[in-house]
């Protein structure tokens, strides 16, 4: 599946528990690459709790069990935004990171932000690949990299595209929820517990 075909949904404060589960499912090395430093479970919980969903935007990719397998946090700063992306190992290389980046890019443009930037360790190959693929200007020093992308103004096409992407993502989540509910009902009718035991 290409990145453009992967539904990416904007998350709300009600998603904090799912966000925490996503970040805690990542290995310590993934935490270091995502946050630039090692993170304890408590520090991750505090990070999730501090996310300001009124100011920032958080986007997610869900698997068939409605678990968050990819997350992008667009943290607003003056006239720009910093982007952080994480994808669980089983979904890497399948386009989720690119889809998250595209959605974050469209959001930032439509919010009339002038620049999208990322700060990461140069050894974070996935983020460096995303930055290069997006045509970001990259400056590296002492094992760290800053990538910048100047954003053109929003237009009718970018606004329509973002609205369509959100509707598609809402439909995707609703269909997955219905499949899960139907599976649980079928298990109950067969006298099994919903988890299949």
Image (tube, rainbow, N blue to C red):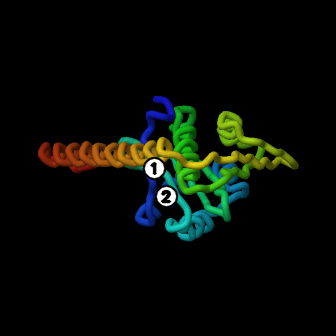
* Residue at the outermost right position: 142
Tell whether 173 sits left or right of 40: left
Placement of 49 over or under 63, stated as above or below: below
**Residue corresponding to mark 1:** 68
Residue 24 position by quadrant: bottom right
Which residue is depicted at the point 76% across and 42% down? 137
Tell whether 7 sits left or right of 122: left
Is 63 or 158 nearer to us in this picture? 158
| Rendering coords of residue 99 (x, y %) | 52, 40
**Residue corresponding to mark 2:** 19
| Rendering coords of residue 121 (x, y %) | 76, 48
Which residue is depicted at the point 47% across and 50% down? 60
Question: Are the residues tagged 2 and 1 within 8 Å (C-beta)?
Answer: yes
| Rendering coords of residue 194 (x, y %) | 24, 49
Mark 2, Cα crowd under 10 Å, few <14 / some 14-19 / many 20+, is: many
Which residue is depicted at the point 45% across and 66% down? 13
Residue 49 has which mark? none
Q: Earlier in the sequence, mark 2 or mark 1?
A: 2
Badge 2 element:
helix
Residue 135 position by quadrant: top right
Mark 1, Cα crowd under 10 Å, few <14 / some 14-19 / many 20+, is: many
Q: Is residue 28 visible?
A: no
């Amino acid at each position: 599946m290409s990145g453009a075909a992967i539904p990416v949904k904007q998350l709300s404060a009600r998603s904090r528990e799912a966000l925490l589960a996503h970040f805690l499912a990542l290995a310590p090395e993934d935490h270091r690459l995502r946050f630039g430093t090692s993170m304890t479970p408590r520090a991750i919980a505090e990070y999730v709790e501090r996310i300001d969903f009124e100011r920032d935007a958080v986007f997610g990719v869900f698997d068939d069990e409605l678990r968050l397998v990819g997350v992008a946090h667009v943290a607003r700063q003056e006239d720009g935004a910093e982007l952080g992306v994480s994808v669980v190992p089983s979904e890497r290389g399948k386009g989720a990171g690119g889809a998250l980046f595209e959605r974050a890019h469209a959001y930032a443009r439509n919010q009339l932000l002038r620049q999208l930037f990322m700060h990461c360790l140069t050894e974070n190959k996935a983020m460096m690949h995303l930055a290069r693929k997006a045509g970001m200007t990259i400056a590296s020093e002492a094992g760290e990299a800053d990538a910048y992308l100047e954003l053109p103004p929003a237009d009718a096409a970018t606004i329509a595209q973002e609205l369509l992407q959100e509707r598609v993502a809402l439909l995707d989540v609703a269909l997955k929820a219905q499949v899960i509910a139907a599976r649980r009902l079928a298990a109950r009718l067969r006298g099994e517990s919903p988890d299949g035991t």
